[in-house]
Image (cartoon, rainbow, N blue to C red):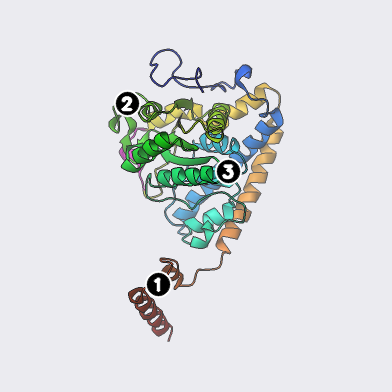
Amino acid sequence: MKGLFDPLVLEGVEMLQILHPDGTMDEGLRPKELTDERIQALYREMVFLRLADQRALNLQRQGRMGTYAPFMGQEAAQVGSAAALGEEDWMFPSFRECAAMYMRGAPMGAIFAYWMGNEAGQRFPEGVRVMPISIPVGTHALHAVGFGLAARIRKEPVCTIAYFGDGGSSKGDFHEAMNMAGVLAAPTIFFCQNNQYAISVPRQMQTASRTIAQKALAYGFPGIQVDGNDLVAVYVATRLARERAITGQGPTLIEAVTYRLGPHTTADDPTRYRSEEEVEAWRPLDPLLRLRRHLERCCLWDQEMEDSVQAYAEEKVNRVVQEAESFPEPAPEEMFLHTLEQMPGRLRAQMEDYLAFLKEQEE
């Protein structure tokens, strides 16, 4: 990590960038495992994820899905970081990491079902090392640290990664987690998707720090700022952070500088706090556009391949929606049964009253 980026250097190289907006790449920094074939495969997944994200937004507008947090524009940050993890690592997502969760093996149909209000959508298949979505902002960073420390006690070569936004870095939970991770050298990656806004609050009104990455230095471990729209740079930074974690060198904070092209959630109207000119200025930096430019420059992609992957993505998204809407509806008593390990009498009485009420409504 040392030598790639110093978050206190404010002149010269301010962030790690390997794949440039025009599609050119610094091949000397490209890891060998990111072959042309793998980059093509990751691009296909990003196309699918962009379409899935757009479909989720449409489903919410149609009344077929609840409040949803789109990730359009942040695909490289999520796909690149998830692709760099090892099979044994654990992911702790917030509410915007559908792409990262999918890349770790969480079925997109289950993720959609969750956003449709079905908690069964968080019961992933055996072996999928993704923790449940954390709706409270920043609290799961502490869980990631504790889990990582437990794995170390068990002598398991496991890394944990906690995702959050720039807004999450303003929460006390984030700082508590960073402090604990630094003191105890937890094998944890703190992955901040700096998409420039905490709902409607711009980053410059959240902190006086020049970067979010430099906050790591106060807690005694490295921070690195990367171009979050650069799939390769995100992969490299995460891979290096993971290597530090599993070799006992402690945590790393990664700040992936990106931009949320859509609303904070489907309950948000971003036109009230940012201009269309600002959004349009970021569109040429779109991570999908950048990766496609690279593939085309290298004669690894053409319009026929693009048409094919778009058709594949459309068909796959249709299957995802069918799967999500086919999930069995949860029984009403489940909201009571899974609240506490042992149900107290008062809660049991509430459940019985509610079930009796529902029965009366049916009669």
- Between disc 3 and disc 2, whose residue precedes? 3
Numbered badge on residue 87 = none
Residue closer to the observer: 121 or 156: 156
Q: Is residue 26 magenta?
A: no
Q: Is residue 270 magenta?
A: yes
To which residue does mark 2 refer?
Answer: 209
Give the alpha-carbon distance from disc 3 to disc 1, as whole Å. 34 Å
- Residue farthest to the bottom, as pictured: 363
Give the alpha-carbon distance from disc 2 to disc 1, as whole Å. 47 Å
Amino acid type of the residue that numbered disc 2 sits on in the rendered structure: Ser
To which residue does mark 1 refer?
Answer: 343
- Residue farthest to the top, as pictured: 12
Give the alpha-carbon distance from disc 3 to disc 2, as whole Å. 36 Å
Q: Residue at x 46, y 36 (%)?
A: 191
Element class at badge 2? loop
Dominant secondary structure, magenta: loop
Element class at badge 3? loop
- Between disc 2 and disc 1, whose residue precedes? 2
Q: Quadrant of the C terminus?
A: bottom left
Q: Pinpoint residue 320: horizontal percent, then vertical percent.
A: 60, 54
Numbered badge on residue 156 = 3
In the rendered image, which quarter is residue 174 located in? top left
Q: Residue at x 40, y 45 (%)?
A: 142
Give the class, few, some or many, for how many residues have Cα within 10 Å of label 2's Cα (few <14, many ≥20). Answer: few
Amino acid type of the residue that numbered disc 1 sits on in the rendered structure: Met
> Is residue 82 placed above or below 267 in the rendered structure?
above
345 vs 249, left or right, is left
The magenta-colored residue range is 268-275
**Disc 3 versus disc 1: nearer the observer:** 3
Give the class, few, some or many, for how many residues have Cα within 10 Å of label 1's Cα (few <14, many ≥20). Answer: few
**Disc 3 versus disc 2: nearer the observer:** 3
